[in-house]
Image: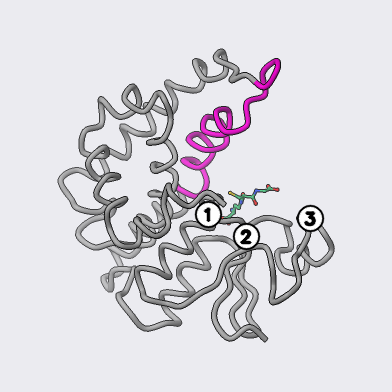
Amino acid sequence: MINKPHIFGPQFSTFVRSVMLCCEEKGIEYSVGLSLGIETIERKSKAHYEIHPFGKFPALIDGTNKIFETASICRYLDEKYPGTTLQPANIDEKTIVDQWSAAISTYIDKILVRDYLLEFAFPKGEDGTIRMDVVTEVEPHVLQTLKKLELLLADNDFICGKQYSIADALLTPILDYLFTLPVKDRLFQSVPKLNHYIQRMQQRPSGVKVLTHQTN
Ligand SMILES: N[C@@H](CCC(=O)N[C@@H](CS)C(=O)NCC(=O)O)C(=O)O
């Protein structure tokens, strides 16, 4: 049995990075990658489905517990392990974090990552070029999504208020990737608060360790 939590998945995945950020913020020692002990698990193999029933990443292996769904993994780590808490104690504030954690993992991930970022990362045009028609079609939705996040952030330090939460861990790997795109200025010019926020999050010790410089 592995004696510290293992985040099963590739480090370039935004969801894997969210779990890493939670561990870093709480000071939890962890390992990460596609190996389990000395065994490398092939993507979509029987062994992968035994860890994650839908063959996705990440999953967390912690002792005999195997947990999937990023937000659930983050909540588990927060409640199981000591360290800074990543969820407000107040139920109303905690629900806002839960609500946005769900929205970031679904709607926001879909527009910003699946529909937009992946077109830059894995271009599907002729000869491996970026399909600019796809970028042009999706970009208004990206800008609307960033505006919603700008309104949510308002004048707070963190996306759901005054403390770093699971919602920040879910959002920042996505914004961090958007920040590396050649179109970054076009995306962030109308959302100045979000622009400063992602730069602050990149500079936190957890961000320095987990965000853009880690690409393997
Ligand atoms: N709802 C899941 C989404 C997981 C997900 O889509 N993970 C991506 C990695 S960023 C993945 O596994 N992609 C590979 C695939 O779909 O085969 C969660 O929150 O963990």
Magenta run includes residue 115 = yes
Query: Is label 2 in contact with label 1 (beta carbons under 8 Å)?
Result: yes
Report whether the residue tagged 1 is closer than 8 Å to ligand 1: yes
Give amino acid for label 2.
Gly
Image coords of residue 139 (percent x, y): 45, 22
Which quadrant of the figure contains the N terminus? bottom right
For the point 46% across and 58% down, the residue is 18
Disc 3: CA contacts within 10 A as few (<14), some (14-19) or many (>=20): some
The span from disc 2 to disc 1 (Cα, nearest Å) is 9 Å
Secondary structure type for disc 3:
loop
Quadrant assignment, res 33: bottom right
Image coords of residue 69 (percent x, y): 58, 61
Give amino acid for label 1.
Phe
Question: Across the whole image, how many numbered discs are drawn on residues?
Answer: 3
Quadrant assignment, res 190: top left
The span from disc 1 to disc 3 (Cα, nearest Å) is 17 Å
The span from disc 3 to disc 2 (Cα, nearest Å) is 12 Å
Q: What number is the disc on residue 90?
A: none
Q: What number is the disc on residue 15?
A: 1
Report whether the residue tagged 2 is closer than 8 Å to ligand 1: yes
Report whether the residue tagged 3 is closer than 8 Å to ligand 1: yes
Q: State the extent of the magenta-drawn residues as a range.
A: 104-128
Tell me: 121 left or right of 83: right
For the point 47% across and 64% down, the residue is 20
Work out whether mark 3 precedes mark 2 in sequence or the reverse, and give the earlier one: 2
The residue identified by callout 2 is 9
Q: Nearer the viewer, mark 2 or mark 1?
A: 2
